[in-house]
Image (cartoon, grey):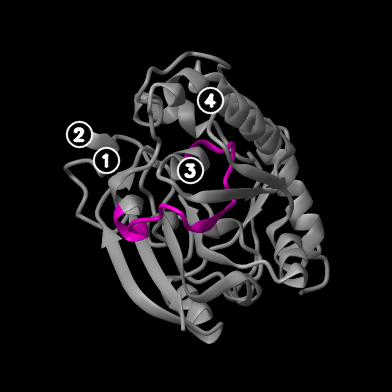
Amino acid sequence: MMAGTPSRNELHEQNRLSWNEATKAHNSHKGDQAKFFQEGGSTLFPEEIELLGDIAGLFLVHLQCNAGQDTLSLARLGAIVTGVDISDEAIAFAQKLSQESGISANFDRADIFNWFEETATTRKQFDIVFSSYGAVCWISDLKLWAKGISNILKTGGRFVVVDFHPVAMMFDTDWSHKFSYFSGSMPLTCEDGIGDYVASSGGALVPWGYETGIENFHNPYHTYEFQWGIGEIVTALLQAGLNLKILKEYPYANGCKLFERMREAPGGRIFPPEDMPSLPLMYGIVAQKL
């Protein structure tokens, strides 16, 4: 790491603080989430359900699970689920939501790199490792991340990720080309921190009914993110001993209005404006441990 660059722990600690603040704003718009789950609701999209396949009875860990809504939706499909996230606020909310909804899941508050080490020492392994939507950009060491995933997968187990495409992450909110595709593994500082993307997306992320909640949210904590290309992600997984089974790209983003003037289609799929050419906004990967 270059002189003057914060250590990995310092980067992650700053991100933890920013996520704690943002999580409060995000959940302020989501109303009675326990009631939504009690009535059989799910926050999963068809893309991740398709890539995951039948998960009933399988041990699944959801990395960077945020406030647990998708984690509980996975448990609703019959998986034995553990959610892991660095944010204290997110995990506290997830535990409360699990209790109030009556859907059983375990939640660990941890930096995933520390969690990988601790889990490997116990030799606990999972059938599926899952991650989604704005997760990989927080990974500060891609090789260590891929190795950690491989270490906790059973033989024959699968890693499944659905995330926003790194090509999309080259643009600013007004669609101007702002960021490089290749970052050379250096952190990108976002002075504004994690914003209230739930407010900007509205009902697309809250299908049971968006509420105003916290308005004009400003995050006092900046963040550090990482731009990893598809080739870098796939290569890290291959080098960690995983076999690539599926790589898909999608011309829309699920639920989240990443940029200005995006068009919402049925099912929460968000497309670029009509005057923009089609480009990949999401990708999906399935990789198996042989």
Q: Which residue is mark 2?
A: 266
Which residue lies most toward the left here? 274
Q: List the residue tagged with mark 4.
A: 101
Q: Which residue is mark 3?
A: 75
Q: Element at badge 3? A: helix
Q: Considering only order in the chain, which callout, 3 or 2, is on the residue closer to the N terminus? A: 3
Spatial CA distance of label 2 from label 3 is 25 Å
Q: Nearer the observer, disc 2 or disc 3? A: 3
Q: Is residue 217 magenta?
A: no
Label drawn at residue 40: none
Q: Are marks 2 and 1 in contact (CB under 8 Å)?
A: yes
- The amino acid marked with disc number 2 is Pro
How far apart marks 4 and 2 lie (CA) works out to: 27 Å
Q: Secondary structure at mark 2?
A: helix
Tell me which corner region of the image, top left, top right, bottom left or bottom right, holds residue 249.
bottom left
Q: Is residue 250 above or below residue 228?
A: above
Name the residue type under label 1: Arg
- The residue located at (18%, 44%) in the rendering is 275
Give SS at disc 1: strand
In the depicted structure, whether residue 7 falls above or below residue 104: below
